[in-house]
Amino acid sequence: MKNLKIRARSAIILFSILIPLLILTYFVKSLGVAIYMFFSAWALYEVISHNQNKRSVNLVISLLSTLIWIIPINWFLKDWGTFWEMYSNGHWVYGLDRDTLISIIKNTIFFKSNAWSGAPGLGLILVFLITTFLLIVDVKSQKNAKNWFKNYFITIFAVIFIPSSFKLIFMYNVMSLYWLFILFLIPIVCDSFAYLIGRLIGRKIIKFGFAPHISPKKSWEGAIAGYFIGALFVFIFMGINFGNSDSIKILINQKQIITAVFVLPAISIIGDLVFSGIKRAQNIKDFSELIAGHGGIMDRFDSLSFNTVFLTFILMI
């Protein structure tokens, strides 16, 4: 009961800080970049700080991850007009239309040839190569070769995935607060109903756990309930168009709707398991104690980050 009160109090404090930052990002895009860049570097440090490398190496890698935000440099040019301009043609400009969002993600955000280098995917390549070099130089920090390879793959995954997913979350924040709100709610809905049903009938029908080696408390009954309630939530709030505005209309054809309904709840569960597996490999319970009762940033953003990446793929259908 005491832990539940701590979690509830922390959640209230977290949302009282987070919601104003999300609103600020929507209205002041350039400031939002700085906010998201800071939190993605912090989240990355939380994860890799348990990999037994020198603290200085982990700090450099965390700072290095900002290259994924900065490159391609085209992203920061004013060619995108409404993306960076807060005031244009005599009126304030907020949000993005769907076509501009998809164009930025497909053609600029990660893989477009950089304006001053001509190299596609330069940010990702540099981060991968420099991180690999730093981990090889710091090899003596590891107990043995097996330990080095384990920590190497965790670090490489984290240094590419975390800033990339946060960059996409930022894009949806800029696109529409409604889009971001629904993305935040998918894992909350899945996790909440999985927890409630798991507490009520967990392991009474299916006697063995859902992922006993990764998350021993999860049950099949809870996972199945979380999945189907999550699928219903996705269908109602992403598949049914309540208006013609791009800021509300998320999925626009049957392929997108069917894929999202089947895939996003499963990805929400998988995202949680992936980061739980990383914590298990690192022999830790939480990535940090930043949020009392909840852990660190990636303890809360694990499923959201995966859902954001996969929603991006779905929008391309």
Image: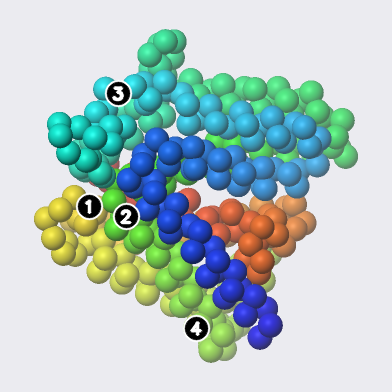
Q: Earlier in the sequence, mark 2 or mark 1?
A: 2
Residue at label 2?
Answer: 177
What is the residue that sits farthest to the left in this orientation? 244
Q: Earlier in the sequence, mark 4 or mark 2?
A: 2
Amino acid type indicated by mark 2: Leu
Amino acid type indicated by mark 3: Lys
Q: Earlier in the sequence, mark 3 or mark 1?
A: 3
Residue at label 1?
Answer: 247
Amino acid type indicated by mark 1: Ser
Residue drawn at (75%, 52%) of the image: 282
Does 138 sit above or below residue 113?
A: below
Are the residues flagged by discs 4 and 1 in contact, CB closer than 8 Å? no
Amino acid type indicated by mark 4: Ile
Are the residues flagged by discs 2 and 1 in contact, CB closer than 8 Å? yes
Evaluate whether residue 272 shows in this view: no
Give neighbour class at mark 1: few <14, some 14-19, many 20+ (Cα, 10 Å).
some
Evaluate whether residue 108 shows in this view: yes
In the image shown, does 36 or 209 lie closer to the viewer? 36
Residue at label 3?
Answer: 78
Residue at label 4?
Answer: 197
* Percent of width and height locating residue 233: 32, 70
